[in-house]
Amino acid sequence: ANSMGQSTIQWSHALLLGALHVLPYFLDTQAGWAHGMTGRYFVTQSIWYFTCALAAFPIYYGILTAWAQRCLSLSGWCEHTYLSLGVFPVVLAWFVILGVLDEFVVWGMEEDAGIIAEVAWALLIFISMFLFYGRKCCAGRRVA
């Protein structure tokens, strides 16, 4: 990410955007408890929602803003094409990451190995997020 440039969005802001995007859907699924939702469904969906909110969305926003920062003075069709060609692979990777996570959710609904695979995929996404944002996402305020 450093070779691409610094992301203009801070980790805490990307985290908030991800939570605001995913939290309403998560809360809506919680209404399913009154209609016979199983514990397995809750576990697989919780992993999906928290992975998206806390890791996948911050990576997505960070990469897109870092790429857009490289193209601040767009003036012609060549520059717009350059920007589009950079955004397209990020969006494609986004759909692949979430598609794999969705498949693990379906597998996790049927077998325990699917839940383990979903957790492993989620950990990989979290590790990627920490590598992308570096120490900025883990650093707390120091008291002098």
Image: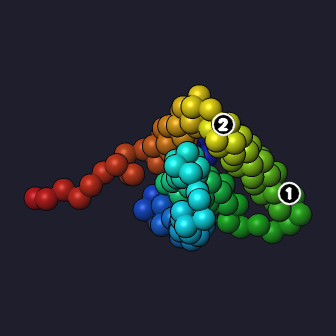
The answer to whether 45 appears left or right of 72 in the picture is: left
Instruction: Give how far across and how far down residue 52 sits, in percent.
Output: 57, 53
Instruction: Give how far across and how far down residue 126 sits, in percent.
Output: 49, 42
Closer to us: 132 or 7? 132
Residue located beneath label 1 in the image: 81
Q: Secondary structure at mark 2?
A: helix
The residue most toward the right is 77
Instruction: Give how far across and how far down residue 66 sits, in percent.
Output: 60, 55
Of badges 2 and 1, the one in the foreground is 2
Please name the amino acid that badge 1 sits on.
Answer: Thr
Report, in whole angstroms, how far the alpha carbon at label 2 lies from the one at label 1: 44 Å
Q: Residues within 10 Å of mark 2 (few under 14, many from 20)?
A: few
- Residue drawn at x 89%, y 63% is 77
Residue 99 visible? The answer is: yes
Instruction: Give how far across and how far down residue 54 sits, in percent.
Output: 49, 54
Q: How is the image coloured?
A: rainbow
Q: Are marks 2 and 1 in contact (CB under 8 Å)?
A: no
- Residue drawn at x 52%, y 37% is 119
Residue located beneath label 2 in the image: 110
Please name the amino acid that badge 2 sits on.
Answer: Glu
Q: Secondary structure at mark 1?
A: helix
In the rendered structure, which disc, 2 or 1, sits on the residue that comes first in sequence? 1
